[in-house]
Image (cartoon, helix red, strand yellow):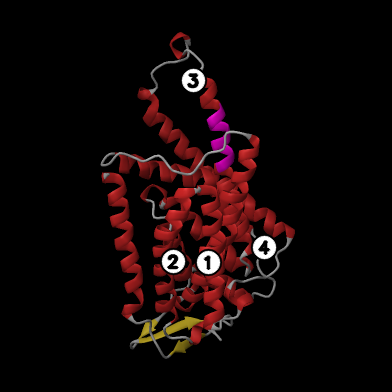
Amino acid sequence: MEIREDKNSIFQVNLFYLLMGLVLLTLGGFIMSKNILIGSLITSYILVYLTSLIYTRIKGYDIRETFKLNKISPRQGFLSGLIVIFAYPLGIFINYLVLLLIGLFVELKTPSIPLPNTPSELWISLFVIALSPGICEEFMFRGLIMSVYDKLGKKKAILYSAFLFGIFHFNLQNFIGPFLLGIVFGIMVYKTNSIYPAMIGHTVNNSISMIISYFANNSMDIMENMDMSENPMAVDMNQYFIIGIIILGIIVLALGAIALTILRSLPEDREMDESSRDYIYEGVENNVNYGEYYDVNYNGDYIENQWKTPAYSYIPIIIVMGIYIFYNYMIFTL
C-alpha cells in the first residue's frame, strides 16, 4: 500500500504519535521510575520500535520502503558519524544559549539520566542511552513519521519530523538540540535513501554525550578534593564570560560549517537522479494553485494530487503540544 494514496495517513500517524506520547509519559514514566536503565530499554524497543513496526504492518505499508532499509557504503556510514561529531558542538552551544534564556525565568532542572562513573557503567550507558535510542527512535521518526509526511514534500517532512522528535522528549531544556539534529538526520536519510546514516549519527551524538559525562564526573571528583582557594589560577572569570561566549560561538560556527560541508559531500543513493537531488538540496516548494496540491516527482515533473491534508489531521499534534506545555509547567513550578 502506498502511503501517498492514503488520504488520512497524516491524521492517523499523528494520532499514533499522540498515543505514543501518552504511553511514554504514563507507562514509560512508571517503568523508568522503578529502574531507569531497564525502563529505557523497554521504552526504546517495545514502546517505540515494536509499536512503530506493528502500526506499519496494520496499515499495510511496505516495511522496506517506509523505514528505508537500504544498504549504505562504508564511506556513507563514516561520513554520517563525522557530520555529527562536527555538528555536536554547535548543537550544544545553541542549546546552552537557550538554557541561559530559560534560566532567566525559571530554575533549571538537573537531568534524571544516570551518568556513568565507571568504565563498566559507561559501556552500559553506551548501549542503553546511545545505541538503543539511536536505532529505535530513528525507526519511528525518520522511518515511519517522515515517510508519511513525505506526501507534503521532503522539506516539510524533514522539518515536521524533526519538530515532533524534539517535542517527544517532553523536556523544554532538551528541545532545540534534538530538533536541529533531527533536521540533519532527515537530510541524511533523503540523500542516501537509507535510515542507517541517521541511526549512526544519532548513536554517535548520544555516545559523545555519555563519554563527556563520564570524564566530567571523574574531573568533578578530582576538583572536589582540591583546595581551589590556594590555587593562584582560581580567579574570578565572570568578567570574561561574554568574551568567552563570543569566541566559543565563532569556533562552534566554524565546526558547524565543516559539518555542513561534509553533509553536502555525503554520497547519495546511486539510483537517485539529478532532479531528485535538486529537490532535496534546494527545498523545492510544493505549488498550490486553484486549491489543488502539487508535488515534484523524481522525474522533475509536477504531479497533481486530488486531495489536501484536512485541517483536523493536526489536532493530535496540538493536543501533544498542550500536554508538553502543561508537563513542563508542572516540572518547573513544583
Element type at mark 1: helix
Query: 10 Å neighbourhood of mark 4: few (<14), some, or many (≥20)?
Result: some
Q: Which numbered disc covers residue 224?
A: 3
Compared across the picture, whether 9 is left or right of 60 comes to left
Name which of mark 3 and mark 4 comes first in the sequence.
Answer: 3
Residue type pointed to by label 2: Met
Contact (Cβ within 8 Å) of mark 2 with mark 4: no
Position of residue 309 relative to residue 156, above or below, is below
Disc 4 target residue: 267
Name which of mark 2 and mark 4 comes first in the sequence.
Answer: 2
Disc 1 target residue: 140
Residue type pointed to by label 3: Glu
User: Separation of disc 3 and disc 4 at Cα?
Assistant: 48 Å
Name which of mark 1 and mark 4 comes first in the sequence.
Answer: 1
Name which of mark 1 and mark 3 comes first in the sequence.
Answer: 1
Name the residue located 54 percent from the left edge and 21 percent from the top edge: 222
- Of 92 and 257, nearer the camera is 92
**What span is colored magenta in the figure?**
210-218
Q: Could you say which quadrant of the image residue 318 lies in?
A: bottom left
- Of 70 and 264, nearer the camera is 70
